[in-house]
Image (cartoon, helix red, strand yellow):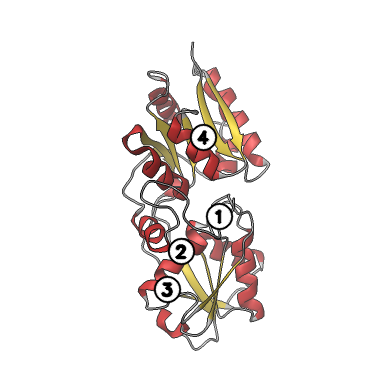
Amino acid sequence: MPTLLLGAVAYDPKVVTIWAGFRAWLRDHGLPFDFVLYSNYERQAEDLASGRIHAAWNSPLAWLRVRRLAGHHVRPLVMRDTDQDLTSVVVVRADSPFEHLRDLKDHRVAVGAIDSPQATLIPVSLLRHAGLTPGENVTVRRFDVGVGLHGDHIGGERDAARALLTGEADAAAMIDANHLLFSGEGTLPAGSTRVLAHSEPYDHCVLAVHDSAPAGLADRLGELLLSMSYADPGVRPLLDLEGLTEWRPGRTTGFGPLEAAISESAFYDEDGRLTEPEYRP
């Protein structure tokens, strides 16, 4: 019997634990399944688009690149409950004079890694729509930690937050959940910052499949993942590590803000080729 092969990016050692656990559970439920690990999302996206792997756990940026590369040959299968309707924020110090994004003209904004959807691409798009052009009337300082991991390594966001706190930047960009995290862990002391602007809601990671997948196995993978219960002690630790309480059917409707940001910045071209000259995963 053929085996369904999935790709995942090893942005953290826990990725091995997560997918080894999922593999054992899926095999116990009759699905011939295995996974391979990648060092960056670009190679994984190219391999999924070409059908060298059958499925992939994609960042939102990788998903949009795969769609440009492969078109109707790929489809979303599932996503986490925590991947839907997220927002990015631009944060300033609580005592700053800024009231609107446009007030950041001629000031400094700290962002995450060059390929972070939530901490760079979407927030910089917000700046553009407020009339701020990086390198012209606003200075954008990137913190390129974990380049190639599409922001999964949040070190760049954390460094941007620290730059705001120390006065190296006048504003910082991050996903809303990490603003809460940084406040809770003390990176941003409680009450030291406030949100200047929010992005529109958007979706995040997607497990996608290629139409080269063995007949019926991709759909069975989706059925099994959707059947996972947080009440099951056998899978709950894996779900906690992966940051979800339930899998949901994948959707394509939540990627407008990132699609716009990719096109505005010419990060990829319309055929999915890398066109950002400073990006070296």
Residues at circles 3 and 2 in contact by the CB criterion of under 8 Å: no
Please state the horizontal and vertical placement of residue 252, each as a whole percent of the image.
Answer: 33, 45
- In this rendering, is residue 118 above or below 249? below
Residues at circles 3 and 4 in contact by the CB criterion of under 8 Å: no
Residues at circles 4 and 2 in contact by the CB criterion of under 8 Å: no
Q: Quadrant of residue 278?
A: bottom right
Q: Pointer 2: what residue?
A: 88
Q: Is disc 2 placed on a helix, strand or loop?
A: strand
Q: Quadrant of residue 39?
A: top right
Pick whichever, 145 or 190, lies toward us.
Answer: 145
Pick whichever, 70 or 97, lies toward us.
Answer: 70
Q: Pointer 3: what residue?
A: 127
Q: Pointer 4: what residue?
A: 231
Q: Along the polypeptide, which appears first: circle 3 or circle 4? A: 3
Q: Pointer 1: what residue?
A: 151
Q: What kind of residue is marked 3?
A: Leu
